[in-house]
Image (cartoon, rainbow, N blue to C red):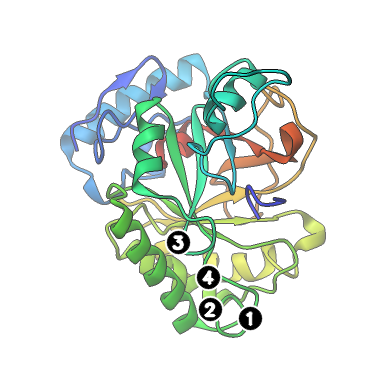
Amino acid sequence: MPGHRAPGPTCEGSTPVRTQPGTLCLAESRPPASVGLGKFANLGTDLAAGFAWLKTLLTGVGIHWGVDSAMPANAQVAGPAGAHEQRPMLFERLSALAGRAPEFWGRYIGGHYSMTAAEARFLHGQGCRVLMIYNGAHDSAASVRGGYPQGVHDAQAAISSANALGVAAGTFIYADIESGWRVTADWIRGWSDTMYDSEFGGAGGIYANPMPQNAPNFNNPYCQAFNADAKMRGLAGHHGAYIYSSEPEPGCGVPGPNRFAPATAPCNPNTVVWQYAEGCYGGLVDQDLANDVGLWSMW
């Protein structure tokens, strides 16, 4: 589980930014027509994305460092040994330990350890984006081992939780599918189609283990769903489905691996976030990298 082992866009530099909730800018390593611009595409955003893509093609795709956690980023934690001042918040403590502030923070909705509006305001006030993870799914016939209706049900629960929190339209929500869970192709399609038809990003995303040895549990059903579902692949002018990969895990370190190299499902190249280490800094956080599109997909 991530963190628990325990529209008028502008671009700054080569990094896509959401300057306020709902305003998007996309920088990619390929022309924007191959991925689309979400449900808010129009001529203005197409033009902006075209320039952003050209700049990224010339300067290289960005790699962005972040973390995810079960503990709220604004929770107070123990400070340095011997310190007598007020206990720092997790965000402050993590930034001090890492020597830098994270660009994004993965947090939950829809299950245990859910994010609050106060925490979201805190993170946004730090200039930190939020990676939205739905952890209300579970490894049973009533959820990921079920069929299309169960996928719809989980997606609706995620959408309801995101709306209650005030998550911006266009934000991707990633369903937490743990390694070893036996997810079905029909559940994946139910989740993805419902996300696609919502106000949130594309056909949604899934956090999963796409390593070959886990293929019977994830890659095989995922690719069966992806190849049969046009919404997952992304219709003209719309984003499709994204993956948040939990593998491989080379180990804790900042800023992490020097290249973006997550495991990915063979049918879908759009793996945009990578959890490369778990239980870092005494179990406080897991560590992640995102490419430009992954960062753009966040709140």
Query: Dot 3 corresponds to which residue?
Result: 232
Amino acid type for the residue under numbered disc 3: Met
Q: Quick check: marks 3 and 4 in contact, CB under 8 Å? A: yes
Q: Quick check: marks 1 and 2 in contact, CB under 8 Å? A: no
- Looking at the image, is 16 positioned above or below residue 73? above
Tell me residue 5's x, y (percent): 72, 51
- The residue sitting at 70% across, 50% down in the picture is 6
Amino acid type for the residue under numbered disc 1: Ser
As measured in the structure, the alpha-carbon distance from the residue carrying label 2 to the one carrying label 3 is: 12 Å
Query: Dot 2 corresponds to which residue?
Result: 186
In the displayed structure, does residue 222 sit left or right of residue 150?
Answer: right
Quarter of the image for residue 9 reads top left
Amino acid type for the residue under numbered disc 2: Asp
Q: Which mark is residue 243?
A: none
Q: Which mark is residue 188?
A: 4
- Of labels 1 and 2, the one closer to you: 1
In the displayed structure, does residue 173 sit left or right of residue 12?
Answer: right
- The residue sitting at 46% across, 36% down in the picture is 293
Going from the N terminus, do you reach mark 1 or mark 3 first? 1
Going from the N terminus, do you reach mark 1 or mark 2 first? 1
Asked whether 271 or 119 is in front, the reply is 119
In the displayed structure, does residue 82 sit left or right of residue 86?
Answer: right
Asked whether 127 or 76 is in front, the reply is 76
Asked whether 182 or 211 is in front, the reply is 182
Query: Dot 1 corresponds to which residue?
Result: 140
As measured in the structure, the alpha-carbon distance from the residue carrying label 1 to the one carrying label 3 is: 23 Å
- Classify 10 Å Cα crowding around label 3: few (below 14), some (14-19), many (20 and above): many
On the question of residue 281 being in view, the answer is yes
Quarter of the image for residue 26 reads top left
As measured in the structure, the alpha-carbon distance from the residue carrying label 1 to the one carrying label 4 is: 14 Å
Q: Quick check: marks 2 and 3 in contact, CB under 8 Å? A: no
